[in-house]
Image (spheres, rainbow, N blue to C red):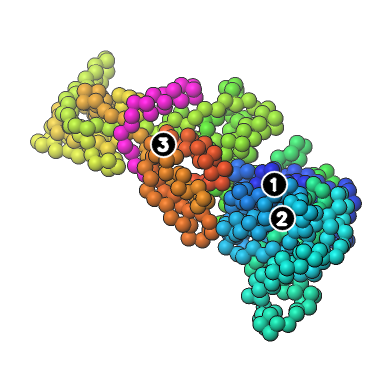
Amino acid sequence: MRVFTVLGPSGSGKSTLVEALAGLDGPGSGATAQVGGVGVRNFTYLGEDWTALEVPGGADMLALAGPALAMSDTAVVCVPADEDAAVLAAPYLRLIEEAGIPCDLFINRVDAMTGRVRDIVAALQAYCSHHIVLRQVPIRDGTTITGAVDLISERAWQYREGAPSALIELPSEMAGREREARSELLESLADFDDHLLEQLIEDQTPMTDEIFEVATKVLQHSDLVSAFLGAASHGNGVTRLMKSLRHEAPGPEALAERVGGGTLAISGPADIRKHLGKVVLLRALGAGLSTAAPLGGETLGALTGIDGKTPVKSVAPGEIGLAAKSDHLMPACTWTATGSAELPPWTVPRPPMVRQIIRAANDRDDVRLSTALGKLQGIDHGLAVAQDETTGNAILAAQGPLHARQVVQRLAEDFGIETVQAPVPPAFRETVTRAIEHHHRHRKQSGGAGQFADVVIAVGPEPRGAGFRFEEVVKGGAVPRNYIPSVEAGAVDGLAEGPNGYPVVDVHVTLKDGKHHAVDSSDYAFRTAGRNAVKEALQQVGTIVLQPILKVEIHVPSLFAGGLVPTVSGHRGQVLGFEAHPTAAGWDVFSALIPAAALDELLRALGGGTRGTAWLSAEFDHFEEAGSKDVLRAEENAAAVG
């Protein structure tokens, strides 16, 4: 069995293409299923078994592509027949380049195309470091594409609705264009084959079979990317693509060599199914898999077909199956009999930047919600769950708005937990801008041993980012040495919440003087005095609110990089600059500083301004004074969280 992943932008016709490929040997062949959002389709073509993994389009779903590609022999990127839409394929081409696996391009819906194929290929080439070679040229009747000429066999094919294309004579008016395109193809192949290069230099005509052999060798080594034409909804060009996969895609032995010896399986997407629990899609390597055999240091549970209903005793090398009742198995890993390893870094999803406070609508479901989120995080490696330090509520971090909605929907449908979402309030802080000295006496008498502590402290500002500093300059033993750490601990307690309700940072507290009582003084009394002294001093001197500033790196197709300057500036950000990505063709890395409170707005603007192709990573950089509008917005968000 060979496995290939079909991916591409939304609306490019991926599902139609998979259906057309699976139906070449007759409709309804093979099983189909959904595993963790990835479509899985088994089918047979000319007596050989195949599995197609279909990754949904859209930026939110790109996290599913890495594990699917890691267990595949080759990939097909389905793209629209529109040069203006080529940028939508940029994230998929970049991922294919990082993966280093063979790839074919399928330019779909050419029946509705009005432009030139070479312009589409040129637009796609901007985002691909490997050279894209056109394997076919279109036959036109006016502006309508009615067929294609194969540039290796030099055969012309007439498209037929819902039927295999008909072999026709090469139209005379196509001869010049066909020779030109074929020469370009042969020259590209000759860069990787000395014998073919010699033939071209000596003006010899290479044999067709020899050209196919060179193409197979070159494409299996990912040296070039082939581009094919068609209209999957009409069945046009699908057979030619499938023949390329059959003759030029490597087998599972190449995958086994890529992941290393001793690997028994690769795990791809995972899911939770009723009556089965967690299931993990596995591709068997090595000697294959069987129930009750050791895998990952534990016993492999039940194995089923992709439908999750048909039990199987074993999965042969190269084949796909579902593992159930094996809770130790995780998605996106390689597995030996005794252990596991993570997949290569290129399979790791983008940082999940859409963050929401999530809590159960009914308080009685709090524990169930925590358990359910843990289970979903275990099958979805594009999802992250954390805890908000301010409210204590769970934070759901997703790949995008659609991903977040899917998680919420699963919580309701699969776990019966209704939830409420709200924005994550920014982690504001407070600080002082001038120094103050304050005296506080703590005295309490309540029948038994009393409490007494007297302190004089100075509170002042520190440089931004310096944090908290404590010192003492007490003389003459006014405060015994053993009580000074208690005063420091009390000062830390007093800084936990300032007058505006936020932690206080970048201050120093100096213990200058004080008094003690031989009987009534204690560690507790001096800690209480230190806390109250700091709180009163902060109230008197006043504080300003600080907002966190993030440093963001936006990965964006070069086409949109210039347009990000007003976008970032319009969201109160500071542009640091941008430069070409060192390894990803057609991409820039745009750096900026932006208030954390504006991150969600920036993400929404980024999605619209780059047609969903850009993504960013963010990390804390520093604090700076917040405006009144930022504080008001945070208070409104906190009220929404409840």
The three-letter amino acid code for the residue at tag 2 is: Phe
Measured as percent of width and height from the top left, residue 555 is found at: 50, 50
The three-letter amino acid code for the residue at tag 3 is: Gly
Query: Is 307 displayed left or right of 399 in the figure?
Result: right
Q: Residue at x 57, y 57 (%)?
A: 127
The mark found on residue 12 in the picture is: 1
Q: Quadrant of residue 220?
A: bottom right
Q: Residue at x 42, y 33 (%)?
A: 597
Q: Quadrant of the N terminus?
A: bottom right
> Which one is in front, 483 or 214?
214
When the figure is inspected, residue 241 is found, relative to residue 540, above or below; the finding is below
Disc 2 residue crowd, few under 14, some 14–19, many 20+, Cα 10 Å: many
Q: Earlier in the sequence, mark 3 or mark 1?
A: 1
Q: Is residue 623 magenta?
A: yes
Query: Is 335 displayed left or right of 140 in the figure?
Result: left
* Residue 131 visible in the current orientation: yes
Magenta range is 618-642
When the figure is inspected, residue 398 is found, relative to residue 297, above or below; the finding is above
> Which one is in front, 325 or 377?
377
Measured as percent of width and height from the top left, residue 541 is found at: 21, 26
Q: Residue at x 9, y 36 (%)?
A: 476
Marks 1/2: CA–CA distance:
10 Å
Residue underneath mark 3: 570
> Which one is in front, 55 or 134?
134
Query: Is 583 displayed left or right of 105 in the figure?
Result: left
Residue underneath mark 2: 106
Q: Residue at x 83, y 43 (%)?
A: 309
* Residue 270 visible in the current orientation: no
Q: Quadrant of residue 258?
A: bottom right
The three-letter amino acid code for the residue at tag 1 is: Ser
Farthest right residue in view = 26
